[in-house]
Image: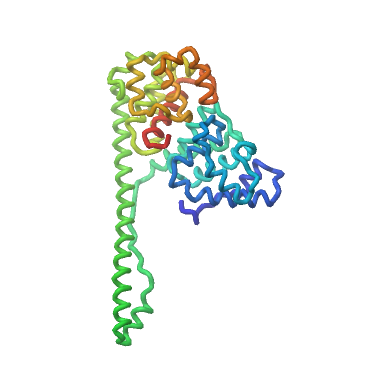
């Protein structure tokens, strides 16, 4: 969706969270919102910064989103990310809500990952989490429709004035008209190629999606881990959710992946899908060799939005074994004794690995 097509109602969204706000503040915040919003579809890093803020996830000083503070300060010089924390979280939450409504790929997956199955709260009482789930479900429904793509002819700008001037026979006017026609022909060709490449990309992604869904079905039938290269029956049941989520993500290459992937994950977990277990028990059930394989390609300082991967990475350092629980909570903002269902853990691992693969986190 282009900026001109964006129908997001900022004023209403802001007043829902700050009912008594002065009109001047609403106007100032809306101006900041519009400016910050312009570049979000070009920067996954900024979207991740917003997720840190919206979900109040601990962040290193080097990751502080000073870019957002600078934008808000243009209309409100006294604003501070540190002292106006709730206002900053509102700003970040509304920006994420806008991006979800716009249909920007990856944002729903990022929001669900940051939410950590509802264990992290937002100032809008999880409204953006519900919106993210709805957006992903909508993608799944839309994919049931016939795929089609059309390439419209590239329009030419009006050259009638240049051509009319050339009819007088003046050499300079004729030269100018020829140059204008040649330039417009070149520009029209560029626009057509751009449209063709866009259609080709859509078609490629659709074919890739279909191939990935077929691969997932064969994977489901084979019950053989893509990452660990052995039967799922040989894997500790407490480790299985993490392995399943990571496995599925590694077989998918386009965010946010087919919505049906969640159904396949749940089916693979079977009767144990709703069994609850702690993060700690999940990590401890993964052997050293399995951990090395599962974390291959995952950077050592993976951001705590990917709480499962960040937590599992802590077990690589024997020197902090006695204080892992404290360090995990300090870095992620949640306890290592937090319980989720095995399905929730698998879905969390799935979205985390998808965002890691795509270079978002």
x 36%, y 75%: residue: 159
**Quadrant position of residue 160:** bottom left
Between 213 and 81, which is closer to the camera in this rendering?
81
Say which quadrant the C terminus sits in.
top left
Residue 319 spot, x, y in % from top left: 43, 14
Between 188 and 305, which is closer to the camera in this rendering?
305
x 69%, y 43%: residue: 19
Instruction: Answer left or right for 53 relative to 20.
Output: left
Scheme of image coloration:
rainbow
Instruction: Answer left or right for 16 relative to 275.
Output: right
x 31%, y 73%: residue: 181
Would you say residue 65 is visible in this rendering? yes
x 42%, y 38%: residue: 140
- Which residue is at the far top? 322
**Quadrant position of residue 221:** top left
Residue 41 spot, x, y in % from top left: 45, 47
Would you say residue 275 is visible in this rendering? no
Residue 40 spot, x, y in % from top left: 47, 46
Would you place residue 26 above or below residue 232 in this image?
below
Would you place residue 5 above or below residue 337 in this image?
below
Residue 23 spot, x, y in % from top left: 69, 51
Between 324 and 180, which is closer to the camera in this rendering?
324
Instruction: Answer left or right for 5 relative to 240.
Output: right
Count of numbered marks = 0
């Amino acid at each position: 969706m282009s900026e001109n097509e964006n129908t997001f109602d900022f004023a209403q969204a802001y007043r829902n969270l700050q009912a008594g706000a002065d009109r001047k503040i609403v106007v100032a915040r809306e101006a900041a919102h519009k400016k910050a919003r312009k570049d979000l579809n070009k920067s996954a890093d900024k979207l991740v910064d917003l997720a840190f803020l919206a979900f109040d996830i601990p962040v290193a000083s080097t990751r502080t989103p000073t870019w957002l503070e600078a934008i808000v300060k243009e209309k409100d010089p006294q604003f501070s990310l540190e002292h106006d924390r709730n206002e900053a979280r509102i700003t970040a939450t509304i920006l994420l809500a806008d991006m979800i409504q716009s249909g920007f790929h990856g944002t729903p997956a990022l929001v669900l990952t940051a939410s950590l199955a509802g264990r992290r709260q937002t100032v809008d009482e999880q409204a953006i989490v519900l919106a993210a789930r709805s957006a992903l479900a909508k993608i799944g429904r839309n994919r049931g429709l016939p795929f089609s793509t059309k390439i419209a002819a590239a329009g030419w700008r009006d050259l009638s004035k240049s051509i009319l001037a050339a009819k007088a026979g003046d050499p300079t006017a004729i030269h100018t008209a020829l140059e204008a026609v040649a330039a417009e022909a070149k520009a029209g060709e560029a626009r057509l190629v751009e449209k063709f490449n866009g259609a080709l990309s859509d078609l490629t992604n659709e074919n890739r999606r279909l191939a990935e869904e077929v691969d997932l079905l064969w994977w489901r039938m084979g019950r053989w881990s893509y990452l660990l290269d052995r039967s799922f029956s040989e894997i500790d049941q407490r480790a299985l959710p993490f392995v399943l989520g990571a496995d599925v993500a590694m077989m998918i290459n386009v965010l946010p992946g087919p919505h049906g992937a969640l159904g396949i994950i749940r089916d693979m977990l079977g009767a144990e899908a709703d069994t609850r277990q702690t993060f700690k028990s999940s990590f401890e059930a993964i052997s050293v060799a399995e951990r090395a394989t599962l974390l291959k390609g995952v950077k050592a300082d993976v951001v705590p939005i990917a709480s499962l991967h960040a937590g599992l990475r802590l077990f690589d350092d024997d020197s902090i074994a006695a204080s892992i629980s404290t360090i995990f909570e300090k870095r992620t903002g949640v306890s290592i004794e937090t319980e989720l269902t095995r399905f929730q853990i698998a879905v969390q691992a799935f979205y985390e690995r998808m965002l890691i693969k795509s270079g978002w986190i």
